[in-house]
Image (cartoon, rainbow, N blue to C red):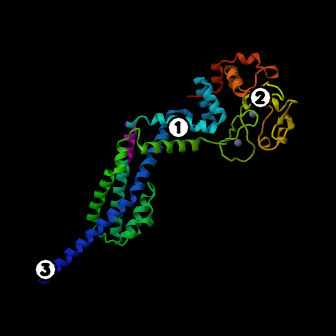
Amino acid sequence: MSHKKEQYSEMFKQYCKGANSVRIFAEFLFKNILPAVEEAIYNRTNLQIINIMKCKNPAFNGNKCNLENHILRYLADQEQFKLYTEYIDNPKLYFKNFIGEHVETFCKDHKKLQDMLHGNLAEIKACISHTSTEVSEEVNLKNGNASMWLNHFCKKLGDHMVINRQSLTSIQDEEISDTKFLKEMMAKYLEEVVKSKNMKSMKSVDASSQHLCLLKQKITEILFKQLEGCWAQCPFCKATCTNTICNHKGDHSVQFHRSSAIGHSYYHKTDEFTNDFCTTNVSSNGSFIILACKKRFPYKSYRRGGDPYDKWSITADGSTQGYWKWFVCRFQKEWEDRCGYKFKGKGVIPDSWRKITKESVLEELNIRD
Ligand SMILES: [Zn+2]
Ligand SMILES: [Zn+2]
């Protein structure tokens, strides 16, 4: 073999070694970043959907108080006793389900979802392609190696997806100086990622898709987290604390208390509901009994009842909201049957309450659409 031929053969071997190295590098890289790519696409889609829902539905475009008013309006519109009991018994769960149902409705438009996922997949694909070209140029200029390439790549993509650089150490010594071939390989594997099984499921959303189920769950969770607050309920009337922070400092409080009949309060040794509002009770000369310890406490110093009474600030301003007066009149029979007490005797419903209309209580909620 002539000297020249030997030289060529050596060059060819080197070339093959380099090409193989690039192939290994690109293949391993994409296999590893596939879950991150997928997650990035879903995260983007989640946020897009949340933004659209907030823009379109004012119930989700404010705080917990605002959402609660929308829920109260919905309940009054539906006028179904069962829904009211679900809300009164477990407001936290009711809020979550209310959000979940709206997410469900939004996600019924599979075509729209598909378009969003598809659009985000295209954007992420362009972003990876652009980043890999940019990084290759930089590393070339600095005469860098695969390790440098990976450092830059992970850092630059970091704004769009979370890639674990540690998981890529096994390819950081590969020979990737043939940047033209690297570019071709990156494009090839990027296309393979797009065609992979997981990504295909993004392009064809159907009702039974596990991805769709997870997407809905995630959106509901994010929205709920954004909109929740303190869930403590008034020990007398079960109204939910209006503080927008979970585990907040200071006392629980609520703008509008309800009739204490909603909290199942009744006059001792009778079957009569107590029908006054907490804000009236705490300025009265009445008292209440805590059954667990069989002790009586004056309403005026309700905090002496200990936990949870001493965690609440109930102002004796006598303020009431027509909403719960209307509710008591509308569902008197149902509430009596449910609790086993009656609106009679000292707990009789005042005539003035009967004049309150649904329209007026809805107006009182002061919802701006
Ligand atoms: Zn109360
Ligand atoms: Zn609270």
Q: Is residue 149 visible to us here?
A: yes
Q: Quadrant of ligand 1?
A: top right
Relative to 297, is 7 on the left or the right? Answer: left
Q: Is mark 2 within 8 Å of ligand 1?
A: yes
Q: Which residue carries the number 2 mark?
A: 277
- Cα separation between marks 2 and 1: 32 Å
Q: Secondary structure at mark 3?
A: helix
* Marked residue nearer the N-terminal end (2 or 3): 3
Judged by its main secondary structure, the magenta piece is helix
Amino acid at circle 1: Gly
Q: Which residue carries the number 3 mark?
A: 5
Foreground residue among 286 and 7: 286
Q: How many marks?
A: 3
Q: Which residues are magenta?
A: 111-120
Foreground residue among 296 and 360: 296
Q: Is residue 60 visible to us here?
A: no
* Marked residue nearer the N-terminal end (2 or 1): 1
Q: Which mark is residue 100?
A: 1
Q: Which mark is residue 33?
A: none
- Cα separation between marks 1 and 3: 72 Å
- Residue at coordinates 52% horizontally, 33% vertically from top-left? 57
Amino acid at circle 3: Lys
Foreground residue among 261 and 282: 261
